[in-house]
Image: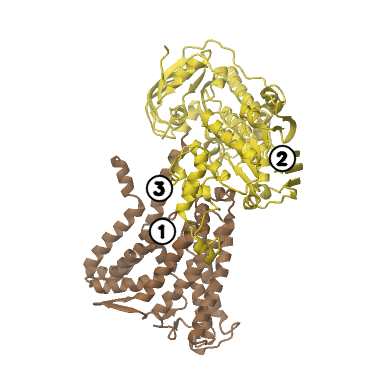
Chain colours: A yellow, B brown
Amino acid sequence: MGNILEIINLSKNYYGIPALKNVNLTVKAGEIHGLVGANGSGKSTLMNILFGNRIIRETGGYQGQIYHRGHLLRLNNCAEAISLGIGMVHQEFALIPELTITENIKLGREITNKLTNRLFGHKYSFVDKKLNAQSAALILNKLGLDIDVGLKVRNLSTNIKQFVEMAREIGRQDLNFLLLDEPTATLNKDDAQLLLNVLLAMSRAGVAILFVSHRLEEIKQICDRVTVFRDGEVVSRYNQGEISTTNLARDMIGHTVTKAVAPTRTVSNNPAMIFKKFSVAMPGEEIRELDLTVYEGEILGITSLSGHGKLALGYGVMGLYPAAGEVIYGKQKLHRMDSRTNILKGIYVLPDDRQGLGILPEHSVADNIIFTGNQVKNLFSLRLPRPFTGFLDQQKAHRYVTQLVHDFEIKCTAITQKIKELSGGNQQKVCIARALTVNPKLLFVAEPTRGIDISAKEKILQMLIETNRSQQTTIVMASSELDELKRICDRIAVLVEGRLFKILSPDASDVEFGLALAGEENI
Amino acid sequence: MNKREQADKLFHSERLVPIIFLLLSYLAWQFSGLSGAFVLNQVITRFIRDGILVLSLIIPIAAGMGLNFAVTVGAMCAQAALLFVINYQVNGIAGILLVALLCITFSTLAGLVIGHILNMVKGKEMIVTIIIGTLANSLYQLVFLVGFGTIIPIGNEEIILSRGIGVRNAVDLDMYRNTIDKLWLCKLGNIEIPLFMILVVLLFACLIYYLLNTRFGQKVKAVGNSNEKAEVSGINVNMVRIMAMVLSTVLAALGQLFFLQNIGMFDVYTAHMNADLISCAALLAGGASIKDAKIRHAIIGIFLFHTLFIVSPQAGQNLFHNAALGEYFRSFVAYGTIAFALIINIKNEHKQQVPSNSI
């Protein structure tokens, strides 16, 4: 079988930071080629290059050659990739929300009226809605899905969206090379298996597939070959039969990760914050009359299924969503949920929505670290008489930020680099650095490790533990990662439908947690 | 459905705005004391004059570019075409064909330029089209106020100011007047219905409906929804946006041509000035929003908006014994509609964003 794709010495830089270094890769017709690597290892960059994404050209193109069916590939946009028979299933869904399922599946390949075809040409020919709907329904049936194809994609659940996106690629007769970016990430096991079967069928029909997944078991199950990426380089390649998940995991990280673990201990009985019938009206994530006590110096984990309120606690304290009930901090009652006064009192909230609320994307790393400290507490201001206060002490800020960037191993070209150019893990480190700058007594964090690769994850957890131990900062950490909570927390509160259901010790078994999350009492 | 949802549904601009316009028009008509036949005749005339201009706004909205206030540029292209042909005194059928040809050429070029500019300022299209319109107006004035008689040779003394440079304020369109207006004229009592012209406007409406339901139309809708997602779906987003702008500008130019030939004369320096405002307001009055506009919004909107436009000065005269107040009410209606529709839009957008924020 011939090579559908051949990549020779491919390199790519973003803003001077290498994303891919001398990558060599081939994909044969009918092969499923797995691609694994930690976040930021260059998988997405490779996908974007192969699909002709505009970002690549706008950031200076790439070096090296790519051959598609023997021809040198030079893509200016995705349309060209599609016309060559290359397809891609996107992780974040490239579906148009206001169009129907049919319109999405058939976009660019609509079946059109024969008469107007002849009159005005294919492009300006009338779209035959009925025939398109039938054809779309047929494709979805192949995927085992029976659904009204006239529904707008906006109203679909994520796993159905995933199937629709898949259907769009399957429906193409000219497809010879398919890129898949974590297609099973949002699916449950049964649905994922369904999708994998479809992929196997496609590969038997001769389509070459490049398959990115974080689920190593799946890679092992369906891939003919698998390539491991680390820091933009190919570190290893295995053939079917030689693939083992432990080897893959080891190659991805490059070293065995020392997992951050906090030793168990006894915590004081002094309450740091007491919530009494606390409610937060965050749409889709409401907290209803929560009673909870946070003790001084502890790390309290908060977990729940999504939509059961774990994220809303921090938002409520920050005043981002209307809150009701009573909150007692130390000895005083908090009357207004206002982030400025709360920060002055020593309460800091790091939200889970890092891009939207956590960072100032267009500002530098340095600005992001000192922003809150300087705005609220004037920590980096020059000491000048009254009307002139507020001027930034550049030297002091520079010294402080340089030290912190070094301590927290924040990877950036300079402290003046815009934070939006950093990877998610480094952005999160900056966020925590900013929180620690104001030296809070009580720190709320939500999903601090979401979308971050394994090694950065452990670094961040370690940072939280150290802060707690060395500065006696009480931490309330909301997360859906049970394993992480169990490693660093002193107690873990489980919320169900916005109410406190149970407080479990980190040593409790997974079964206990599972039952608690489902809102069922132990038998 | 609870009360809140019901209220939301009613408060949706698609229903609320036309209902308010209907009530206002009815009240103003009652106070104006004008006869129904008179108002209807006027509305039909304006439907013909303004129809294609309003329709020209639909495609850019579908492509996600908002209200195209640069339809004034299309209008200016039409006027420029007319002035050039009158200047060189090409008469008869040849003249009409030449006007149409020049009009389409000018507006296509203008549309390409505007499209390119708008591709550089994605997300801020509306404000940019307003500025482009104003800028084009200055250039237009420069050409016809100063260019004629200096750089451009004069071929027709009649349209030139007595000083020998610049075009007169008002130019007669004698040779085009009543050429097609009176074709297939039906009379229903006191009401005159120029069937041919109405059919022409409806033909353009059908053309736009057809275009939006072709493959090209699917692309336009996809681009209107999300630039990024359309891009990765293999659509050349910039190209589609430029085409939408060209179509809109050409339609606007043709619309202005219809407008002017129907009136029979035109003010060289002001005839295009309110083309954007009035057609945008008419479209919004029909229930369109800056994200979603359909043919029916355009047609309903023209009738509702122009009814109010026609009766309000007389209503002002009768109510307050002051016609100027009615004239004032006209501009209040036009700007008010646009402002209201924009606010409702942003409100609705905000509503949709809240749940998507939650996890």
x%, y% of residue B276?
44, 66
Whether labels 3 and 2 belong to a single chain: the reply is no
The residue located at (36%, 57%) in the rendering is: B287
The image quadrant that residue B246 belongs to is bottom right
Give the residue at mark 2.
A28
Query: Which subunit holds the residue at mark 3?
Result: B
Give the residue at mark 3.
B348
Q: Is residue A235 left or right of residue A117?
A: right
x%, y% of residue A241?
70, 26
Question: What's the CA distance linking mark 1 and mark 2?
Answer: 48 Å
Q: Quadrant of the N terminus of chain B?
A: top left
Query: Eyeballing the image, is A84 above or below B199?
Result: above
Three-letter code, disc 3: Asn
Query: Which subunit holds the residue at mark 1?
Result: B
Question: How many discs appear?
Answer: 3
Label of residue B294 in the image: 1
